[in-house]
Amino acid sequence: MTYGERLQDALNRAGRTRRQLATAMGVSPQAVGMVLTSSDGLERKLSAINNEKAAAYLGVSRLWLLTGEEQPEKEVQRISG
């Protein structure tokens, strides 16, 4: 599973849209879309800080989102700060 596929899976699990995630991270929906749909053969990932924000917002493990290791968590959390 690629990073984009894990991110999409996390969005689906949390019942969130890419627009909601983008707003929570302070980036454009297009930036999230580029990660979700890397079609040029390159695997795009969020920056380290945005990976942490996305994981917290979507209620999944940072490590799982980044690498696929561990199991994703299920509880949706809010980004603080």
Image: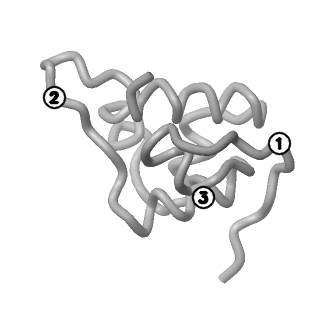
Q: Nearer the viewer, mark 1 or mark 3?
A: 1
Q: Secondary structure at mark 1?
A: loop
Residue type at mark 2 is Leu
Q: How many marks?
A: 3
Q: Earlier in the sequence, mark 2 or mark 3?
A: 3
Measured in 3D between alpha carbons, the distance from the residue under mark 2 to the one under mark 3, in whole angstroms, is 25 Å
Residue type at mark 3 is Ala
Residue nearest the viewer, comparing 60 with 33: 60
Residue corresponding to mark 1: 74
Residue 21 percent location from the top left of the image: 58, 47
Dividing the image into 4 quarters, which one contains the N terminus? top left
Residue corresponding to mark 2: 42
Residue nearest the viewer, comparing 6 with 53: 6
Residue 52 percent location from the top left of the image: 53, 63
Residue 42 lies left or right of residue 78; in this view the side is: left
In this view, 72 is above or below 17: below
Residue 11 percent location from the top left of the image: 64, 33
* Residue found at the far front of this picture: 70
Residue 21 lies left or right of residue 5; in this view the side is: right
